[in-house]
Image: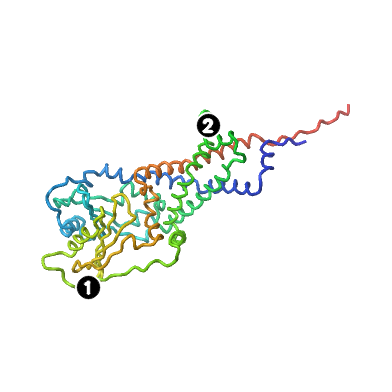
Amino acid sequence: MFKRTDKLKKKQHKSLFRIVVDKLHLWLGLGAGIIVLIVSITGCLFVFQKEVNDFYYRKILYVTPEKSPLHPVSELKKTAEAVLGPNKPLSSITTYRQPDLAWEFMAYKGNDTALTYFGTLEYYESVMINPYTGQVTGRLDYKHNFFSVVKGIHWSLLLNDKYGQPVVGWSTFIFVILLITGLIMWWPKKWNKANRDKSFKIKWKAGFKRVNYDLHNVLGFYAMLIALVIAFTGMVWAFKWFEATVYVVAAGTTSPPEVKQYESVQAPAPAGSNPLDIAYSKALTMLKEAKRFYIYADERPKGVITVTGNKSVETYYGSDQLTFDRYSGAFLGRRNDSHKNNGERLIEMNYDIHVGAIGGLPGKILAFVISLICASLPVTGFYVWWGKRKKSKKKQVVIRKAPVASTM
């Protein structure tokens, strides 16, 4: 006769739905676990990149405020161009109202034909200048910066976006499925005290296997909602279809609002003035709440000067944008944050939500902790599976043979 094991009896009571859920959670977790681990760890590291960079590069990024007037942007631009050389034209300028911050003059050029992260960046550098003295405080190579490399791993596994991002994107999609199937598996059949304790508390005094099991189940449950937000915001970048879906859901329409396009006319600037300085001076007056300014000067014949003002040094959402003639500095048009629909606003918030910056320092700490938990889930999940696998090898079905009658 056969002796049924407890495991066999337990399987007989499982519904087809639970069997499918269990198998999905197991095999998808084993398949995508290593990518989820890498993406979560690098995301965890990147959360406080600004704070760490500010500390490490403090002598380059910060200056001593002075009572002397600030140097004109056009003059500082020439200084930066001389440092970078003619083969690295400026891409953008970042200035601040905060008096102790150096201004940043950035040069960037990509190469979409390369295979790896380092090949896709021909150069990505910034010259930092003291706006009071006009002196260069330092030069930053973002291409080889530690956090840029961490971001490259997190974004596309240090591959070209068209190769690496789909892998990261689909692994993130699988992680969402793992969170949902994990919740189904976690859900107690009965809400009695014993099950509540097992579902919501970690039994620290138990053995390693039980603690590991609780770390996987309990921490996974507590992290689930924020982990889903982080995963969904990551998928916005990975998939155009998902970004379009988020936009439509938030905006309630598939048609974005019309954005007026402007062109420069070759009208000369007032004698003795520079159009870039004129544009920046007007922007300071018009964007009174802005604390950080991004200046983009399109050098094409009909290109314009665009000045974007952010209300925070930490975040990127909620910006207002001004457009100026590149020849005269004349004001051409304005598009405020209030002119955007909810879809545009949500997509613009995506980065700040993803890294937790939208919630300030508490938001970053929360994003850090949740990312750390997400990184632990593939590890604790693997040990749960490995422990059951070893256990199942030891407990085989026992076959008992009936005794043979003696003929003697």
- Quadrant for the C terminus, please: top right
Location of residue 251 with respect to 58 vertically, above or below: below
The residue to which callout 1 is attached is 265
Q: Check disc 2 and give the amino acid type.
A: Lys
Q: Residue at x 31, y 52 (%)?
A: 143
Crowdedness near tag 2: few (<14), some (14–19) or many (≥20) residues, C-alpha within 10 Å = some
Front in this rendered view, residue 325 or 192 = 192
Instruction: Where is residue 20? Give x, y as percent.
Output: 62, 49
80 relative position to 360: left or right? left
Instruction: Where is residue 302? Give x, y as percent.
Output: 25, 71
The residue to which callout 2 is attached is 203
Q: Which residue is the extreme one toward the right?
A: 408
Q: Which residue is the extreme one toward the top?
A: 408
348 relative position to 400: left or right? left
Q: Is residue 127 visible?
A: no
Q: Residue at x 53, y 40 (%)?
A: 217
Q: Residue at x 56, y 38 (%)?
A: 386
